[in-house]
Image: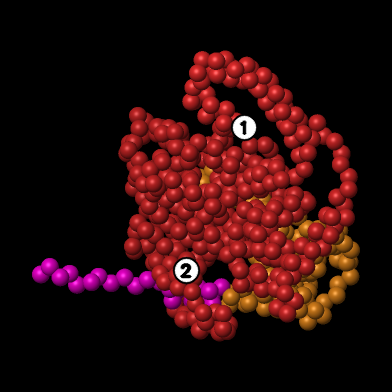
Amino acid sequence: MYVAVKGGERAIDNAHAWLAEERRGDKAVAELGVAQIREQLALAVNRVMAEGSLFDPDLAALAIKQARGDLIEAIFLIRAYRTTLPRFGGSTPIETEAMVCDRRVSATFKDAPGGQVLGPTFDYTHRLLDFKLAADGEVAPVQTGTPYEGATPHIMSFLDREDLIQREPEGADVPADLTRMPLELPASRALRLQSLTRGDEGFILGLAYSTQRGYARNHAFVAELRIGSVAVEMEIPELGFAIEIGEITATECETVNQFQGSKTQPPQFTRGYGLVFGMSERKAISMALVDRALRWKELGEDNLGAPAQDEEFVLYHSDNIQATGFLEHIKLPHYVDFQSELELIRKLRREAQVPKAAQAESAEASGGNLSGKMKEGAVT
Amino acid sequence: MNMMGDPNAARKEWLGLLAKSKAADLARLWQASGAEPEHKVLRAPEIGGVMVRGRAGAVGAAFNLGEMTVTRASVKLGCGAVGHGYVQGRDKAQAHCAALVDALMQTDASARVEVAVLAPLREAAAQAKAIRAAKAAATKVDFFTMVRGED
């Protein structure tokens, strides 16, 4: 039952005004600009774009500022904004093969064409706090080398040539879109990938880690991890041809996984795939592992009952905006709901007390027993 | 891009260049070019989203990766040339300007616009790309094999 309750307006207004003041913090400290967030907290911006499902670094930076650095709140703001945009259309699938890579590493082939390029990575740092950063903003000049001019084919294409890797099936030209249609199960791989790429990084990471620890282990190698910029092309109806409408930064992870073969398939490697907006390699690797775990049915593997294999469990719990919406609503007024619960429990207790009292009388008559007294003691 | 024999190759190239340009760069170059063609607005600048797609395993079925912001505009010059501008992001002036450049590129003014606006944009993009590529190249791992100690 819902009963309208009034009276909170002034408290709410004042709370929001205080929030704005707290957001600003100590006025003796310089205010943080949106451009500063975009440039200097770029990985937070990337996460908000990936899970907010909207590539726009300026908006993501603004959302982070507005949310006081609460990234899930910032993602919420971006999701809300996204729904106000008219949809001009869908791009042709981006050609990650043509990505201009800032980083490209393979854990399976040392001598990939173009080589192993580390890019601006945290890997191999000692994870010691750098107090120099607190003191000044000086940055040492960056070394440059001779740019590699050749193509950087996907590592996986070498295995493909030998037919050692499972072929990727074709799909619909226009993939199903979970922002337009409610998610239905069983979901196509396209829907699963859309769901994973916008899913909560922590949740996807936890699931991926669970597969490594043995819950539907799938023995993943990172065949290739690449980060860089890639052009986005879209067919423009008024022109009658496709043009580039922009360029995004993306992280792609392809895993190569063991596969024993099945009744219809000879033994060969299989793939997991991760593709995420921005520089988000933890998320991309996690996505690839979970994608692979969810493919058990189409690859003819056993369902081991592992969480990462359970499509319903994964897809219905990976969205942090859905999750936080439902979770946090329980803090909002439930006075009437709770009133009815309160009345119910009082009634149950009254009913329970009557036979108990009668029971206690008869027990006393027979000398009593310890367990009966303990129980009653626990209730009161 | 730049497919041999594609009659739209040149227009594709400049539209892509405008789409990826920095709003401030385009505004500065456009102002400096002094071009102020008389025109009618066919489509006032409009901000929207485009669903960016990827492929499963980079080669398989298409899937929706997420949206990006795009702003578009269309203009018609006095001479009848129609220009369309699509730019990444939410800058309406940039989209309008891109549409004007696209329209002018279909007229006698194309050589002038090419020199004043497109060439500098192309150069700036190439330079930015080269700088990143050079930095990436410096982080390429040069493997060498250690001498084994068992002999």
Look at the image and give the colour of chain B: orange
Whether residue A317 sits left or right of residue A68 in the image: it is left
Residue A67 locus on image (x, y percent): 70, 61
Relative depth, front residue between A231 and A357: A357
Q: Within the magenta stretch, is there residue A248?
A: no
User: Mark 2 belongs to which amino acid?
Assistant: Thr
| Chain letter, disc 1 residue | A
Residue at 61% across, 72% down: A40
Q: Secondary structure at mark 1?
A: loop
- Which residue is denoted by mark 2 in the rendering? A121
Q: Is residue A350 visible?
A: yes
- What is the magenta range? B129-151
Q: CA distance from mark 2 to mark 1?
A: 61 Å
Q: Is residue A68 left or right of residue A159?
A: right
| Left or right side of A344 for A275 | left
Query: Is A240 located above or below residue A38 in the figure?
Result: above
Q: Residue at x 17, y 69 (%)?
A: B148
Colour seen for chain A: red
Q: Which amino acid does the dot numbered 1 rest on?
A: Thr
Residue at (57, 31) in percent of width and height: A377
Callout 2: chain: A
Q: Which mark is first along the chain, 1 or 2?
A: 2
Q: Which dot marks residue A380?
A: 1
Disc 2 on helix, strand or loop?
A: loop
Nearest the camera: A103 or A121? A121
- Snapshot colouring: by chain
